[in-house]
Image (cartoon, helix red, strand yellow):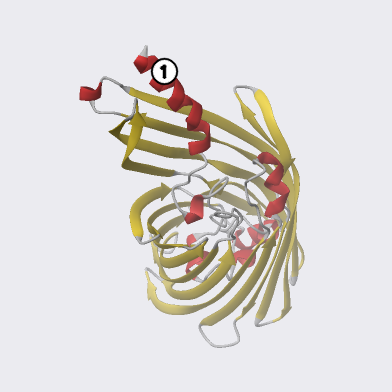
């Protein structure tokens, strides 16, 4: 009877404990990867609106009219510090997969990119008061899952200076959370674990343009209009909100020989997702500013290589203890062609620093992108 009462009490407090997150960057519904290709990430996101490898601007699809396949691998290694105590964690992401092809003035693309990633795991020890005695125990809290943006996009060259595009988005995914407390076998208390799975589904449309006003300048801009977004548990509707609206603008200058300078601004209305969360969840609209430089390097396998540098400053959508989290990042990378120019490997290393609610987080990203043009 005593063991049953203890387990019942622990189960009663588990839902509140699930509010704890694995780090500053994965609060709320998860970390927004930005849906950037590896090359754009190296430039602080500055070229994203004119990058066919970033599933941002549907008009940019036509800048790679040949049939191509692009895929990414992106591990993150982070350390979170709160009140002088630190914890390390690692997350392995596959944030993007795109297939693109075109005929004459038309081009189309199918992509699947990570919209929000909520993967983290915490294991730590503490003591629990049981029957008037402090008993040692181990707590486990983890989340695994993401919301994926599956997009079908098409673009059309109106004339040599203007290209337009449209995209249709289906957002699907799930979060699988686990929280448990275990006691040593010698106590006779046992352990208790709670599993929860919440699935998400939503839709959106996007439109964009790429414009070349003069020979050395390119401008890319896009808008996303969010539709309904629903959360469900065991086929029962939990809450409804909207996919966040988004707007972005990139400007690139190529007037310096073998050099590209770029800047980008993005605003996302993440507060439109607030209806999916609890009243205590803090959801903020977020801004993203990136600056970058790309320099042409020596030819490899008959095609040019590239070196890239970038800086990025943005705010994250989901707050910690009511405070919005900010992120600053410095990045660099290279692009190396091979297979006689029919393939290219993009490598990017990024150092990110985040702060909010009196806590700090430092992270290393290694982004690996592979593009193949048969």
Q: Position of residue 62 (x, y in %)?
A: 66, 59
Name the outermost residue toward the left. Answer: 186
Q: Closer to the camera, 46 or 201?
A: 201
Q: Position of residue 185 (x, y in %)?
A: 22, 23
Q: How many marks?
A: 1
Residue shown at the point (59%, 53%) measured from the top left = 318
Can you see residue 212? yes
Residue at x-position 29% and y-position 28% = 183
Q: Secondary structure at mark 1?
A: helix
From the image, which quarter does the N terminus lie in? top left
The residue indicated by pointer 1 is: 5
Percent of width and height locating residue 105: 72, 58
| Residue sitting at the far top | 1
In this rendering, does residue 373 appear at all? no
Residue visible at 41% across and 78% down in the picture: 297
* The quadrant where residue 55 appears: bottom right
Tell me which residue sits at (43%, 33%) in the image: 179
| Residue at the outermost front position | 132
Residue 344, picture quadrant: bottom left
Q: Is residue 356 left or right of residue 224?
A: left
Q: Position of residue 89 (x, y in %)?
A: 36, 51
- Say if 361 sits above or below 308 in the image: above
Circle 1 Cα neighbour tier, 10 Å, few/some/many (<14 / 14–19 / ≥20): few
Looking at the image, which is closer to me, 335 or 30? 30
Dividing the picture into quadrants, the one containing residue 247 is bottom right
Q: Is residue 12 above or below residue 164?
A: above
The single residue placed furthest to the bottom in the displayed view is 256
């Amino acid at each position: 009877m005593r063991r049953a009462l203890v387990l019942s009490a622990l189960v009663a407090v588990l839902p509140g404990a699930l509010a704890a997150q694995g780090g500053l960057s994965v609060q709320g519904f998860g970390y927004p990867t930005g849906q950037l290709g590896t090359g754009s990430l190296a430039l602080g996101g500055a070229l994203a609106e004119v990058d066919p490898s970033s599933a941002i601007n549907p008009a940019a699809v036509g800048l790679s009219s040949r049939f191509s396949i692009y895929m990414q691998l992106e591990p993150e290694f982070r350390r979170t510090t709160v009140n002088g105590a630190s914890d390390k964690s690692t997350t392995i992401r596959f944030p993007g997969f795109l297939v693109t092809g075109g005929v004459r003035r038309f081009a189309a693309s199918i992509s699947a990119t990570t919209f929000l990633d909520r993967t983290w795991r915490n294991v730590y020890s503490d003591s629990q008061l049981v029957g008037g005695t402090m008993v040692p125990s181990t707590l486990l809290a983890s989340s695994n899952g993401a919301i994926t943006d599956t997009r079908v996009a098409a673009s059309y060259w109106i004339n040599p200076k203007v290209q337009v595009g449209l995209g249709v988005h289906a957002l699907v995914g799930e979060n699988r959370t686990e929280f448990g407390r275990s006691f040593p076998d010698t106590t006779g208390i046992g352990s208790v674990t709670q599993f929860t799975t919440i699935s998400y589904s939503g839709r959106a449309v996007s439109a964009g343009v790429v414009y070349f006003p003069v020979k050395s300048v390119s401008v890319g801009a896009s808008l996303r209009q969010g539709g309904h977004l629903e959360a469900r548990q065991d086929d029962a509707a939990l809450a409804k909100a909207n996919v966040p609206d988004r707007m972005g603008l990139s400007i690139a200058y190529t007037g310096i020989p073998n050099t590209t300078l770029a800047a980008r601004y993005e605003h996302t209305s993440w507060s439109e997702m607030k209806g999916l969360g609890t009243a205590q969840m803090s959801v903020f609209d977020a801004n993203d500013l990136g600056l970058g430089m790309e320099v042409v390097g020596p030819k490899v396998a008959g095609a040019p290589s590239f070196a890239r540098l970038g800086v990025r400053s943005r705010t994250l959508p989901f707050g910690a203890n009511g405070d919005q989290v900010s992120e600053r990042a410095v990045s660099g990378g290279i692009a190396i062609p091979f297979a006689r120019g029919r393939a290219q490997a993009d490598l990017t290393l990024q150092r990110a620093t985040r702060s909010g609610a009196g806590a700090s987080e430092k992270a290393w990203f290694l982004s690996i992108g592979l593009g193949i043009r048969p």
